[in-house]
Image (cartoon, helix red, strand yellow):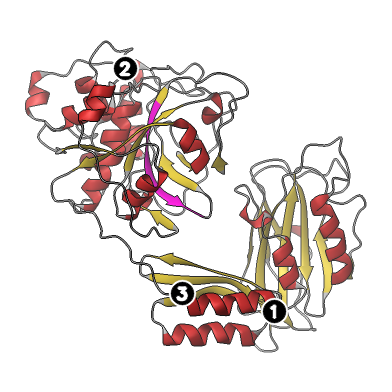
Amino acid sequence: MHRTAQSRSRVLGVTSICTVGLLVAGGAVAQSSSEEPVEPDPPGTRYATGLNLMPVAEMRSLPELPTFRAFLPDTADLSSKFPRAGDQGRLGSCSSWAVGYAARSYYTSTVEGKVLDPASIVSPSYLFNRARPRGCDGGSSLSDNVYALKDGAVSLAQHPYIDKCETISTEEISGATEFKVQGLFRLDATRIDDVRGRLAQGEPVILALQLWPSFDDYRGGVYHVDKTSNNAEGYHAVVATGYDDHKQALRVINSWGRKWGEHGLMWLSYDAYAQMAEEAVVLRVAGFKPNPPVQPLDTSELSQLIADINTRTCANVTFRQDGKTVVVSGFVGSDDDRRRLEELASKNPDIKVVSVATAPWPQCELKQMLARATEEPEKPIISVVDQDHLSPGRLLNVTVHTPGHFSYVYISYIQADQTVVHLVQPNGPAGQTEPNRELHFGDGQQGRPKFTIAPPLGRELMVVVTSRSPLFENRLPTSQSARDYLSLLRKALIYRPRTDLPERVIAAALVDFETKATP
């Protein structure tokens, strides 16, 4: 079922073929962990789809992969081996983007060892115009594209993308000898564990999803289906590139440009997948061998130690299996507890202790209280310059990046003597901070005050809390005891002082550091 884009903020025209080609090619590089900011598409933007489901008989004729029954690690992520998300524009070419641009590029990167650039990525235009069984408005199925790709394709550099139908010349077809695939295997689309299993073994999974309008409106976080407004709007192809059991979601790459979702990617909740999935298939490419299943590690001794630390003290320590390693993270209330974890890890090379901070009271209680807020997708970011070398006389130079929405911002400094100093707080209901602002404090530049390190010294904490509506009924004093602050914050997290203002979405960021007598 095919849906065309109704209202794109950017129009791809026939006359802009060079511009469009350069734009898409410019994005055809491997994904990186640090993406430059982009302005998201406005709310209400609607995008093209173009997926035709395979006939039932054809789907059943595909070889089926066995049910996955091996151990599944908590996470798997193949995203770094994919190109950046591209943009299909107004053309119903999503299947060609999923099969050719996204999935085939993964094997180009992993099996063939090539750097992903326009010369090493399938041209979605070429593949779509070879695969479509009917006119330009008909779209294509996943199998249509795989069968076309069995004969090969040309690269994005050879055939830049434009969002319109074209006639492929016989000369171009005869020269399309690269990017061949061997075939297509199907999974039981109703079994999320089969999808996770393939991802855990290094195989991306191409998905056929039934869409609701809320899918178009996704701009970050974990997506859950909202069926309240309208009926389903057709079918769309994406590729699952990973999963995270902590988020209870699959990571998928889409073809609606980097202004949709999280730079073109999405966290698709497991419950949304269960409601939307129609087909799940994997490619077979010559030379590819799935990774052997990960074997579970014996974590009984570690589990007992963590349970003792978490229940006996103010702490929150967790662990997860990452491949053949057990990664321990979180915070403890004392150096003795951290040493207990490190001693166990020293006897077991499979255990790795990372990012386990020592957080005495009140820092530990504050971390526990704000644990959920620090997991919000749109949260502030805080950094402290030279945080490992803070001694008396040095400046406390702080930078805060605000979330991507208007918010009330509270910045507090928990000192070693358990005094809380409130550095920034809104000035009443009108005191919202604009989205994506970069705020600087303590450096003495451009008329800003200087924050200078002075005794008492020790473990300290900087906290940024943001909310769509005010947290507190009254302005907080410049400084107060930690116990008084925690009492007010605990109440604020469960109580809305102004019900006439927007629903609160509370997010937080924390940074630990230690001030010392010598650098």
The numbered mark, 3 or 2, whose residue comes first in the sequence reads 2
Q: Is residue 238 magenta?
A: yes
x then y, percent, for residue 255: 39, 32
Nearer-the-camera pick, 177 or 211: 211
The residue where tag 1 is placed is 312
Q: Quadrant of residue 349?
A: bottom left
Instruction: Please provide the residue range marked out in magenta.
Output: 236-245
The numbered mark, 1 or 2, whose residue comes first in the sequence reads 2
x then y, percent, for residue 459: 71, 79
| Three-letter amino acid code of the residue under disc 3 | Thr
Q: Which-is-in-front pick, marks 1 and 2? A: 1
Q: Is residue 28 visible?
A: no
The residue where tag 2 is placed is 164
Q: Quadrant of the N terminus?
A: top left
On screen, residue 242 versus residue 367, left or right, reads left
Q: Which-is-in-front pick, marks 3 and 2? A: 3
Nearer-the-camera pick, 24 or 79: 79
On screen, residue 270 versus residue 350, left or right, reads right
| Three-letter amino acid code of the residue under disc 2 | Lys
Q: What is the crowding at mark 3: few (fewer than 14 residues within 10 Å), some, or many (at least 20)?
A: some
Q: What is the crowding at mark 2: few (fewer than 14 residues within 10 Å), some, or many (at least 20)?
A: some
| Three-letter amino acid code of the residue under disc 1 | Arg
The residue where tag 3 is placed is 299
Label 1: element kind: helix
Mark 3 to mark 1 CA distance (whole Å) = 20 Å
Q: Looking at the image, is 46 positioned above or below residue 97?
A: above
Circles 1 and 2 in contact, beta carbons < 8 Å? no
Mark 3 to mark 2 CA distance (whole Å) = 55 Å
Q: Looking at the image, is 334 positioned above or below residue 154?
A: below
Which residue is rendered at x = 31% and y = 47% of the image?
67
Q: Is residue 335 visible?
A: yes
